[in-house]
């Protein structure tokens, strides 16, 4: 009976990286003594200000809190020109604390509709740009108030979530209050009628970029009045009248970019726009079904100096054609544009707009994740996303990273990814790109990039590349982030990486174990997903014996027990139980197992979790109790806190549940049966009936464990009679005769021998038999017993080759011949079975029985339990020595009469005992 290890096989400033070389450390320029001797407040103000600029907001606050000088420098206006609050809770209280620093605030990114009042509290009257995610609950009133208080606004972006409560009324207020508006992008607005759009045309004379995405009701004719417009996007918008749209949009004098992706536009509209518009250079039409079905692909680029971007055109080549110089590798198009110095402002605006529109469309396509796009992703989609990751725009990088993360996933629930898509990212050097971005100091970008890395790492091949590229150190560092989203995704990435056996040690060496334990201990309750991921990673790492010791040393046992006791989130409960199970899976003398049992409330909590309504929790808890029950003290505590009743109930309920739960329930009960007192208690608690049902299972692991448990139970006479009464003989006979598992046949044979060995109650300890069993007729029992023992005999005989036995006899049973026979009939799993002294005594008594079947079976059993190299060989040999069995064995081995198998089996047992004694003597020397 072996313990089970369970493993899951189941987001401004420029980016920068600063590394301190080992040479610098060794030279003494930056050792601890030097650092302690520096008066940091004497550094020039410019140096400290630059240092502040490299920190996220939380670290800025920490540094500013160290002294009055740093507090003053940390409030310099140059540090507060831009705020990205998407990763933070931004409410009125937070706004009050920030307001003194935000007088010169120009750019603001935030999340959630309840931040509208907080924006006003910031008192950032100079605010020029607002970008807001999760906008579903932003109302006309909220947006109108924001516009009225910030008349300097030049850019407003609301999305990609739908702004379902925003209508034309709010758009009109924006037009009246924000005359400097240059860019307006809104997703999913309820409507934008002619009055609203005409108000924009009248009051916002500098408006050059407008996007009404995923909307239902847009006045396409009124859009023709926006004479200042350079870029227009109606991607995903429905109910457009394309004839009218083409007629008026082609007359826009400054229009150079038009995005009609994910609409029902047709090829004639594209032709009309290109032929009629004076300045239109780029028409983006990604995922336009009717357009792509009808258009002649060979005539795509017949408009000189203009590009049409579709899913079947070469997108990167099309963008590269805008450049005056030649580009060898078009996949680097956006990175190349970022590097070159181009004085053409108009061209720069076009490339920036293309990046935004393409990244948005690819994000939407990835989110829908339709099978029909497989060829697109493999042929060019993955390459386009990787190119966008190299954009100079952070929002484009974020959107591309998000698209990478989601386009990989086939089945979200089972964390299944498309290996071909992952391979496409790998071929494009995507792992290196993502890891570079993960080193950014922008936490929102970090969370999205790490999510992509985590999804890629589900593929073991990619996981190894991530590790080889230094990803484990990067992810371990991010797991320590004080930003919940970053830490959450980093924990998940480590969870995925820890599935790969070869990477477990590397994660531990990088400090991953400590980082994961700290996540559990330091984050407060309510962050269930983060805790679940950290716990799942620890559970995977605990499948490695060395890493399991690291988990224990880092305080992981206490942390996991704390979760099992207090956390109500089922995902955390399941992973905590799995982690505890794996920690306890290294032997019945394992220190981890004992340490878990010594934690206050640990075993009681696990017992209570067996009543969970979640089967995944019940499975992992059953496995944990199974492994923990190999420790004698743990068995006592488990029994004392209701573990017997709980596991019997679990075994009973598992009959109508999954095979996995059946296996683990049977295994947990068998482990408890290592204590002889539990055998009577489990029999009385009704544990026999469900085990008989499980013994009928077609699954080898299940019926093996059930048969093993019934063998231990049958040691007591009243239990044996219960097995007979509950029709347990037939399934045991069937297993003994027909199971494909030799170990299951062996266990069933031992159970039948216990039940029908004829040893009287005086010789075998019993409890008081229930009155219902007193009516059984001994004649019927004897008849059933004879038939059962006949099957036991057939099993024993089937285990050896008569020719080999005869050859051994002819060779006068020399040790070499005996060793060959022993190896041939070895049952490998039998080495995990641990017998008590009483059980060994019972086998010895059977050797002296007049029944040759009992002699053969007992000798066969003792042979299996004493074979060299077995887990409990020393234990069993010591018990046999105490029982003085040597003389009995020698008498039987030298007997001239009797079954040949009994003689050979007893000789092998004697040889096993001698070999064990020699090993003990050698060990002492």
Image (cartoon, grey):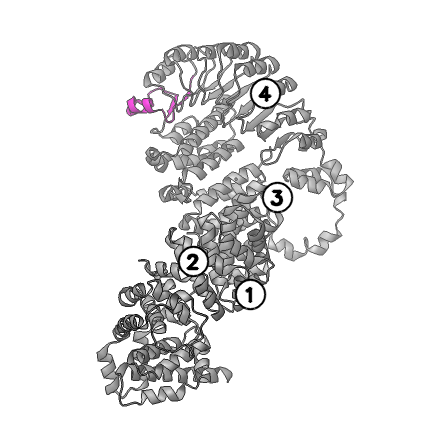
SS under mark 2: helix
Circles 1, 2 touching at the beta carbon (< 8 Å): no
Q: Secondary structure at mark 4?
A: helix
Classed neighbour count for the residue bearing mark 3: other residues with Cα under 10 Å, few (<14), some (14–19), many (≥20): some
Q: What residue sits right under mark 2 in the picture? A: 665
Q: Determine the CA span between mark 3 and mark 2.
A: 40 Å
Residue 308 visible (yes or no): yes
Structural distance between the alpha carbons of marks 4 and 1 = 61 Å
Disc 4 versus disc 1: nearer the observer: 1
Q: Which residue is mark 4?
A: 143
The mark nearer the N terminus, 3 or 2, is 3
- Tag 3 residue: 482
Q: Are marks 4 and 3 in contact (CB under 8 Å)?
A: no
The magenta stretch is 280-309
The image quarter in which residue 23 lies: bottom right
Q: Which mark is residue 594?
A: 1
């Amino acid at each position: 009976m072996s313990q089970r290890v369970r493993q899951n096989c189941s987001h401004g400033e420029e980016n920068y990286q600063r590394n301190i070389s080992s040479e610098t450390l060794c030279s003494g320029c930056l050792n601890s003594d030097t650092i302690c001797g520096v008066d940091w407040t004497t550094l020039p103000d410019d140096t400290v200000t630059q240092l502040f600029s490299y920190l996220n907001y939380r670290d800025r606050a920490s540094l500013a809190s160290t002294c009055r000088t740093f507090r003053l420098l940390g409030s310099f206006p140059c540090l507060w020109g831009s705020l990205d609050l998407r990763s933070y809770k931004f409410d009125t209280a937070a706004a009050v604390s920030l307001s003194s620093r935000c007088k010169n605030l120009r750019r603001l990114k935030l999340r959630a509709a309840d931040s509208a009042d907080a924006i006003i509290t910031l008192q950032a009257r100079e605010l020029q740009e607002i970008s807001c995610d999760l906008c579903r609950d932003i109302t006309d009133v909220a947006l109108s108030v924001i516009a009225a208080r910030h008349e300097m606004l030049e850019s407003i972006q609301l999305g990609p979530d739908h702004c379902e409560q925003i209508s034309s009324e709010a758009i009109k207020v924006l037009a009246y209050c924000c005359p400097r508006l240059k860019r307006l992008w809104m997703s999913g607005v309820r409507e934008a009628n002619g009055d609203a759009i005409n108000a924009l045309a009248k009051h916002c004379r500098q408006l050059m970029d407008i996007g009404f995405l995923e909307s239902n009701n847009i006045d396409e004719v009124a859009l023709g009045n926006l004479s200042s417009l350079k870029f227009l996007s109606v991607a995903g918008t429905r109910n457009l009248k394309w004839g009218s749209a083409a007629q008026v949009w082609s007359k826009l004098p400054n229009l150079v970019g038009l995005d009609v992706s994910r609409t029902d536009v047709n090829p004639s509209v594209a032709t009309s726009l290109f032929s009629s518009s004076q300045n239109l250079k780029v028409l983006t039409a990604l995922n336009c079904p009717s357009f792509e079905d009808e258009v002649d692909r060979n005539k795509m680029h017949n408009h000189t100096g203009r590009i049409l971007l579709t899913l079947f055109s070469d997108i990167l080549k099309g963008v590269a054609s805008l450049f005056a110089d030649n580009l060898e590798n078009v996949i680097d198009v956006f990175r190349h544009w970022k590097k070159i110095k181009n004085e053409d402002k108009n061209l720069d605006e076009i490339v920036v707009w293309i990046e935004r529109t393409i990244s948005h469309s690819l994000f939407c396509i990835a989110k829908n994740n339709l099978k029909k796009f497989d060829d697109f992703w493999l042929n060019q989609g993955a390459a386009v996303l990787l190119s966008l990751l190299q954009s100079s725009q952070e929002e484009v990088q974020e959107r591309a990273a998000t698209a990478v993360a989601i386009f990989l996933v086939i089945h979200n629930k089972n964390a299944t990814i498309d290996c071909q898509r992952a391979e496409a990212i790998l071929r494009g050097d995507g792992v290196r790109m993502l890891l570079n971005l993960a080193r950014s100091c922008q936490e929102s970008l970090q969370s999205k990039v790490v999510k992509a890395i985590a999804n890629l790492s589900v593929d073991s091949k990619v996981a190894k590349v991530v590790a080889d590229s230094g990803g484990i150190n990067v992810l371990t560092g991010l797991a320590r982030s004080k930003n919940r989203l970053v830490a959450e995704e980093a924990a998940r990435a480590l969870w995925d990486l820890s599935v790969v056996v070869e990477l477990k040690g590397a994660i531990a060496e990088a400090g991953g174990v400590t980082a994961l334990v700290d996540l559990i201990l330091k984050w407060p309750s309510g962050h269930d997903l983060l805790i679940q991921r950290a716990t799942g990673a620890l559970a995977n790492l605990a499948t490695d014996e060395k890493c399991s010791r690291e988990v224990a040393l880092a305080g992981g046992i206490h942390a996991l027990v704390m979760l099992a006791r207090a956390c109500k989130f089922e995902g955390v409960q399941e992973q905590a139980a799995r982690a505890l199970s794996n920690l306890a899976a290294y032997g019945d003398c394992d220190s981890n197992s004992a340490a878990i049992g010594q934690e206050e409330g640990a075993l009681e909590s696990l017992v209570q979790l067996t009543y969970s309504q979640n089967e995944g929790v019940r499975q992992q808890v059953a496995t944990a109790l199974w492994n923990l029950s190999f420790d004698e003290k743990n068995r006592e505590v488990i029994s004392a806190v209701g573990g017997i009743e709980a596991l019997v109930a679990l075994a009973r309920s598992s009959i109508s549940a999954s095979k996995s739960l059946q296996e683990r329930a049977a295994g947990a009960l068998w482990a408890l049966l290592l204590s002889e007192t539990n055998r009577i208690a489990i029999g009385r608690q009704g544990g026999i009936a469900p085990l008989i049902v499980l013994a009928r299972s077609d699954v080898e692991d299940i019926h093996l464990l059930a048969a093993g448990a019934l063998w231990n139970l049958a040691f007591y006479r009243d239990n044996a009679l219960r097995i007979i009464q509950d029709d347990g003989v037939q399934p045991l006979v069937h297993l003994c005769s027909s199971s494909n598992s030799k170990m299951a046949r062996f266990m069933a044979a031992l159970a039948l021998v216990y039940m029908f060995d004829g040893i009287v109650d005086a010789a075998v300890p019993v409890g008081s038999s229930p009155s219902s069993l007193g009516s059984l007729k001994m004649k019927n029992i004897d008849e059933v017993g004879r038939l059962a023992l006949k099957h036991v005999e057939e099993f024993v005989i089937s285990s050896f080759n008569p020719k080999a036995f005869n050859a051994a006899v002819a060779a006068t049973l020399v040790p070499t011949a005996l060793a060959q026979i022993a190896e041939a009939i070895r049952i490998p799993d039998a080495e995990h079975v641990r017998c008590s002294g009483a059980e060994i005594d019972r086998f010895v008594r059977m050797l002296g029985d007049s029944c040759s079947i009992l002699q053969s079976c007992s000798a066969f059993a003792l042979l299996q339990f004493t074979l060299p190299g077995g887990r409990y060989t020393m234990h069993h040999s010591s018990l046999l020595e105490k029982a003085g069995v040597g003389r009995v064995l020698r008498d039987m081995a030298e007997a001239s009469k009797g079954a040949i198998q009994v003689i050979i089996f007893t000789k092998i047992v004697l040889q096993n005992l001698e070999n064990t004694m020699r090993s003990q003597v050698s060990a002492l020397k």
